[in-house]
Image (cartoon, rainbow, N blue to C red):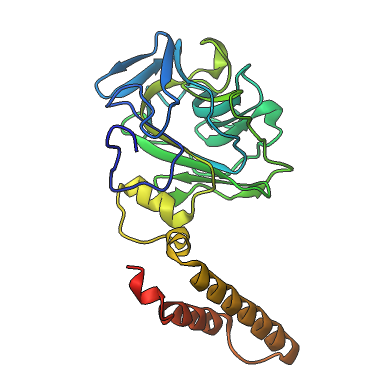
């Protein structure tokens, strides 16, 4: 972590911007540069429709991803502004947490020519002009896109035809604009951005809920797997193969263990591995 960025909630972001602490990327070297009237004021990045923030280029290729931002709007009637986007350096292609572009009062995943955009069919925004809201959009390798608002799924996920890949050194993150290199036009957001993170994987529902609440009171599946030794991982793989065989046999017989029983047995087996008791 950079500059002691060791807060209680950290799920491996590749970029972290806490604007109460300035424009520095607290995880890497994607520091933010301001353009137009954008400014830091009262612990937030102020974007008034004529200003934006843009980072230095990405330090790795990015495909599967999650965008996370905590933002407050100046008003609910504005249309088409982006709170946080990842884009190619020319301003295209892009994927964005966008407000009220296709449908008034709705958050949506903005994208180049709407090629990856469908409506989540979430609820109308009613409070973001009075208090900050926490927003996350996740993008899976298979094209599945899911939105979250204040830790809960926002509408329904959907599957796009593809997920855009952003090249190291030729892509960046922008704030306060849907996409582009300079402030101006209907792409601009009017509001305050307090904090944002970029991830190189899709966050899980439980991780998003934890981030929204700023609490870390569980261990993720990824952390458990990362903590296992090679021998433990081999044993886990063998157990998973046994589960697959059991499920196939059950399907052929039409009876036997329920799926809940199978997963219960897997969890029991993992936590009774001789080596596993020394992990924590």
Q: Which of 71 and 274 is in front in this view?
A: 274
- Asked whether residue 92 appears in the rendered view, the answer is yes
| Residue drawn at x 50%, y 84% as measured from the top left | 265
Image quadrant in which the C terminus is located? bottom left
Q: Nearer the viewer, residue 126 or 257?
A: 257
* Left or right side of 11 for 249: right
Q: Is residue 31 above or below residue 51?
A: below
Splitting the image into 4 quarters, where does residue 197 fall?
A: top left
Q: Nearer the viewer, residue 133 or 90?
A: 90
Q: Position of residue 72 (x, y in %)?
A: 36, 29
Residue furthest out toward the left: 42
| Residue drawn at x 30%, y 47% as measured from the top left | 214
| Residue drawn at x 42%, y 53% as measured from the top left | 207
Q: Is residue 194 above or below residue 204?
A: above
Q: Position of residue 77 (x, y in %)?
A: 46, 23
Q: How many circles with numbers are drawn on the protein? A: 0
- Asked whether residue 99 appears in the rendered view, the answer is no
Q: Position of residue 256 (x, y in %)?
A: 62, 92
Q: Where is residue 194 in the image (x, y as percent from the top left)?
A: 34, 29
Q: Is residue 19 above or below residue 183?
A: below
Splitting the image into 4 quarters, where does residue 2 fall?
A: top left
Splitting the image into 4 quarters, where does residue 49 fall?
A: top left
Image quadrant in which the N terminus is located? top left
């Amino acid at each position: 972590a950079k500059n002691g960025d060791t807060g209680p909630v950290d799920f491996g972001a590749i970029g972290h911007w806490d604007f109460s602490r300035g424009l520095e990327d607290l995880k890497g070297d994607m520091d933010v540069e301001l353009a137009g009237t954008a400014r830091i004021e009262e612990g937030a990045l102020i974007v008034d429709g004529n200003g934006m923030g843009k980072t230095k280029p990405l330090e790795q290729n990015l495909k599967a991803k999650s965008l996370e931002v905590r933002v407050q709007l100046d008003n609910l009637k504005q249309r088409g502004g982006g709170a946080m986007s990842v884009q190619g350096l020319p301003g295209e292609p892009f994927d964005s947490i966008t407000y009220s572009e296709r449908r008034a009062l709705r958050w949506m995943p903005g994208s180049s020519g709407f090629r990856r955009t469908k409506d989540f069919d979430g609820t109308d925004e009613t409070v973001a002009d009075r208090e900050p809201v926490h927003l996350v959009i996740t993008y899976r390798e298979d094209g599945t896109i899911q939105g979250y608002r204040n830790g809960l799924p926002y509408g329904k996920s959907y599957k796009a035809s593809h997920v855009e890949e952003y090249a190291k050194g030729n892509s960046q993150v922008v704030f306060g604009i849907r996409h582009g290199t300079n402030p101006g036009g209907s792409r601009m957001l009017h509001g305050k951005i307090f904090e944002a993170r970029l991830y190189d994987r899709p966050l899980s529902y439980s991780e998003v809920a934890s981030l929204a609440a700023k609490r870390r009171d569980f261990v993720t599946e990824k952390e458990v797997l990362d903590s296992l030794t090679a021998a433990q991982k081999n044993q886990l793989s063998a157990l998973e193969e046994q589960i697959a065989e059991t499920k196939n046999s059950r399907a052929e017989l039409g009876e036997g263990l329920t799926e809940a029983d199978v997963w219960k047995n897997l969890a029991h087996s993992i936590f009774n591995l001789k080596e596993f008791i020394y992990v924590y």
